[in-house]
Image (cartoon, rainbow, N blue to C red):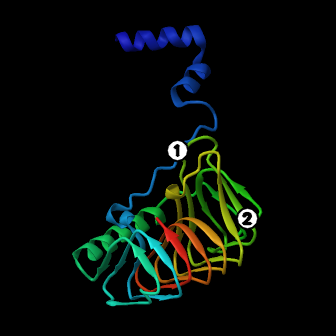
Amino acid sequence: MRVRSQLALALAIIGPTTLLVGMIGPPGASAAVLPVPLGTAANYAVLAGSTVTNTGPTTITGDLGLSPGTSVTGFPPGQIVGTQHISDAAAVQAKNDLTTAYNDVAARATTATVPVELGGTTKAPGVYESPAGTFGITGTLTLDAEGDPNAVFIFNAASTLITASASRVNLVNGAQSANVFWKVGSSATLGTYSILRGNVLALASITVTTGVTVDGRTLARTAAVTLDTNTIAR
């Protein structure tokens, strides 16, 4: 009875419309995008399902994992500042955690549907998809955290991610590569001498062509990660 009386008094003083706005928040308010839980996969700069193949003096900072495949080639000349886990218990667990993270991203509600081409645009934190189910970057994509170092950016591609040669992803106003996620429903191809920031979670393969820098992770669930004179740092 006391609650009803207080509510009636509030309605009498400030009116029903004002009270309703106060209860549900300001118009247009939305919850922040939650981070993606990578589990033990967060330890890996490179993680694959079938093979990991490298050409040239690639440098990987972070662990390299493979499961269920067993073939890792090209190290040396490639260097790993971390630990290799080839079809061991740690690699199996990381692959399971990658699957969990991939499914988590796939289930996220979309903030906005945007054109396939991301180059030349600036994106705020959110969950993005394209009508064609694919993303491309030609030129520069800028991710603006708007002063929030915990801001999360998710690009949910139903099929492919393809970046052009010399393309790049820039982070501004507190954006962190650890909070950028590229979920790819089939395969990702990163163009020569491009710079990608964030975590690539691919269902199939990831091809990292000559001279690419990845500030983040290349994590492939079922197929290969192919490298060529790259710098990858988780």
Q: In which quarter of the image is the N terminus?
A: top left
Number of marks drawn: 2
Q: In this view, does 200 lie above or below 228?
A: above
- SS under mark 1: loop
The residue drawn where x is 65% and y is 68% is: 130
Provide residue 54's location: percent of width, then percent of height: 48, 87
Upstream in the sequence, badge 2 or badge 1? 1
Residue named by callout 2: 140
Provide residue 68's location: percent of width, then percent of height: 31, 85
Provide residue 105's location: percent of width, then percent of height: 47, 63
Provide residue 91's location: percent of width, then percent of height: 29, 76
Q: In this view, does 64 lie above or below 120?
A: below
Q: In this view, does 20 lie above or below 81?
A: above
Point out the frontmost of discs 2 and 1.
2
Camera-nearest residue between 46 and 3: 46
Q: Distance between the residues labelled 2 and 1?
A: 25 Å
Q: Quadrant of residue 89?
A: bottom left
The residue drawn where x is 64% and y is 43% is: 146
Q: Residue 32 carries which label?
A: 1
130 left or right of 10 in image: right
Disc 1: CA contacts within 10 A as few (<14), some (14-19) or many (>=20): few
In the image, what residue type sits under mark 1?
A: Ala
In the image, what residue type sits under mark 2?
A: Thr
